[in-house]
Amino acid sequence: MTPPFKRYPLPVRILLLFSLFLFNMGVVSFIAMFLAQKIFNLENTQSIIEGTFTGANDINAFLLIQGITSLGGFVLTAMMFAVLESGEFKKYLRLKTLPSPKVIALAMLSIVVAQFFIEYLVEINQKIAVPASLSFLTDYQKKAEEITNAMMNFKDLGHLFFVSIVVALIPAVGEEFFFRGLLLGDLLKGKIHPAIAIPVTGLVFALSHLEFDNTIAIWALGSFLGYLYYVSGSLWLPIAAHFTNNFLAVLMKYCFNLGLISEDMANAKTPLYITVVSLAIFVMFIFLFNKWKNPATFVEVEVSNNETTTI
């Protein structure tokens, strides 16, 4: 039996994908708020969703809502849509292919090195004036930063673990399932050239974050994650790199809260020469990835019953 979405052309499938994502986000968000209200004995969750916290209980409730919503919105949508397109999801999303340990280590090290260059991209982005029609994005980003600072204001290992799961691990898995495993995978299987599919997916990834000042940096990061997916043929490689990027932010904030570092890395300024050196090392790592690459085929092949499947 042909999977129901397999018969539709690529543009229609992309539209159906985002429609399913919005539907799942709505349903899962309602469930998450209901659970948070019951678990934390809250009168309502509206103020928490808006980022108005009155104590640690509210922050924990927000983390629970965010974690469940991210899992339901990204992971569940990717798995459901992969089944509707192919009949299964593990092979379709490239979860059965495992990269070598040296490639995983190189991907994680690349993210660490790239932090200095990413910071430089943020500085460039901040010099671009926000159009009046998009001024709401500035307010949204300021509110998001306030929420992030509230979530990151902890000094105990328990909260470090909890925040790392919600802020670093779940988004790394969920967003890679959705943006690289499914969206980028579908574009590549639809014979869109990697030089187009990878940056386009990276841009969609960046825009979805609604962070104007960080758009260029997130776009660059998303494109690199797409490149890792393409050259390795495995979704686990961009997941590892994505988690490294997110966890670094959590870890640095934790160290700052404990007084182990004197400056909040989110506000730190890196000298230009360090940025240049980090970029040079990052480019060298790209050459290594090309040398060790084991790219997936991302093509459709005919099967015996005259149906098509994707590999």
Image (cartoon, rainbow, N blue to C red):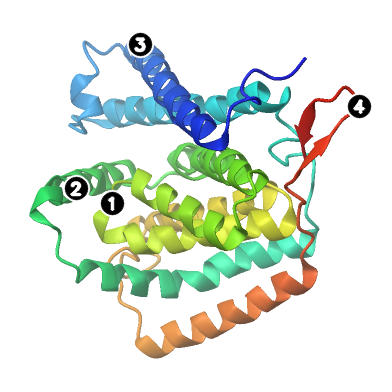
**Which quadrant would residue 289 be assigned to in this image?**
bottom right
Q: Is residue 149 above or below residue 283?
A: above
* Left or right placement of residue 38 versus residue 235 in this view: left
Check if mark 2's residue and mark 1's residue have beta carbons within 8 Å: yes
Label 4: which residue?
A: 304
Q: CA distance from mark 2 to mark 1?
A: 7 Å
Residue count near mark 3 (Cα–Cα under 10 Å), binned few <14, some 14–19, many ≥20: some
Q: Is residue 166 above or below residue 254?
A: above
**Which quadrant would residue 230 be assigned to in this image?**
bottom right
Per the rendering, the mark at residue 211 is 1
Identify residue type, mark 2.
Leu
Position of residue 281 measured from the top left corner of the image (x, y, whole percent): 58, 82
Q: Residue at x 21, y 33 (%)?
A: 51
Check if mark 2's residue and mark 3's residue have beta carbons within 8 Å: no
Q: CA distance from mark 1 to mark 3?
A: 28 Å
Which of labels 3 and 4 is toward the front? 4
Position of residue 19 measured from the top left corner of the image (x, y, whole percent): 43, 25
Position of residue 243 measured from the top left corner of the image (x, y, whole percent): 55, 50
Per the rendering, the mark at residue 34 is 3
Element under disc 1? loop
Label 2: which residue?
A: 137
Q: CA distance from mark 2 to mark 4?
A: 51 Å
> Which callout, 1 or 4, points at the residue further toward the start of the chain?
1
**Is 295 or 53 nearer to us in this picture?**
295
